[in-house]
Image: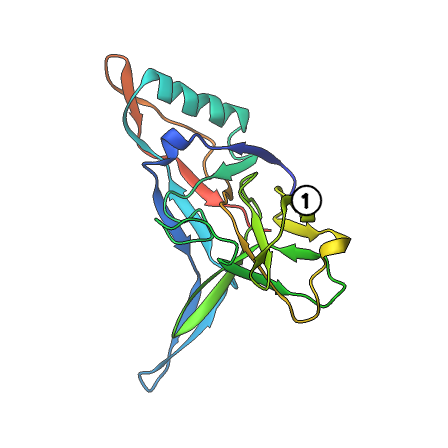
Amino acid sequence: MSNGFHEVQFPLRLSLGASGGPGRRTDIVALSNGGETRNARWADARRRYDAGTGLRGLEDLYQLTAFFEARRGQLYGFRFRDPVDHASAPPGQAVSVIDQQIGTGDGVRTGFQLTKTYEDAGGASTRRIEKPVEGSVVLAVDGLALGQNDYAVDHTTGLVTIVPGSVPAPGAIVTAGYEFDIPVRFDTDRIEISFAAFKAGSVPTVPLVEIRP
């Protein structure tokens, strides 16, 4: 993660109405025979959101303005909770220690990066999870849960470090469960509020873009 990041979360009350999700960039070349070739320009998806609000009271509008000003527009990044995809488990399911495989032990390795894999019968894609929610990370080795004193979590990078006495044996599968935020920044240096009623208004668009490492 580059410099210029504040470990604060975009107000959950305002993020619930957001729209957006992952985007990819693919080059498609049409061939003379009518076929085509495809090439992925990005190894990983980049997420974009619009947290524009409908009609809101002055308190919500002020909260958005204050948050924007504290980030100085696009200058500083922050945490954003995706209303759909914010945990190691699918929506509606509780987080479990066996949700995501994050590595394999070799008897020496102690550091494991949190990741999340999306897969089906046709393929898979894995993303780094760099902003886990504090207190949400649970870990297991070969399906056996580790105690909270057996590992430490860097909530600013998503790196999990297992203490020497609990180092996974060679071939042991390390799994994790967690909730997470997405590192984003404002994709504009201007917030425009429309006052549509007495003591109420709206912000038609509040573009956010994921910050990639």
Spot occupied by residue 90 in the image (x, y as percentages of width and height):
39, 54
Above or below 128: residue 30 = below
Tell me the residue at 34%/82% (across/down).
35
25 or 108, which is in the foreground?
A: 108
Amino acid under label 1? Answer: Asn
Tell me if 22 is positioned left or right of 3 in this view. Answer: left
Question: What's the residue at 34%, 39% (across, down)?
Answer: 18
Give the side of residue 99 with respect to residue 204, left or right.
right
Rendering colour mode: rainbow
User: Circle 1: is it few (<14), some (14-19), or many (20+) Cα within 10 Å?
Assistant: few
- Residue closer to the observer: 52 or 8: 8
Task: Look at the picture and state if 17 lies above or below 151.
Answer: above
Residue 212 in the image, given as x and y percentages of width and height? 55, 50
Residue at (55, 37) in percent of width and height: 77
Furthest residue toward bottom: 33
Q: Position of residue 194 (x, y in %)?
A: 29, 23
Of residues 30 and 187, which is closer to you in this image? Answer: 187
The residue lying at 76 percent from left, 63 percent from top is 108
Q: Is 157 above or below relative to 101?
A: above
Query: What is the x, y in percent for residue 5?
Result: 60, 37
Q: In which quarter of the image is residue 141?
A: bottom right
Q: In this view, does 123 lie above or below 84?
A: below
Disc 1 secondary structure class = helix
Q: Name the residue under label 1.
A: 149
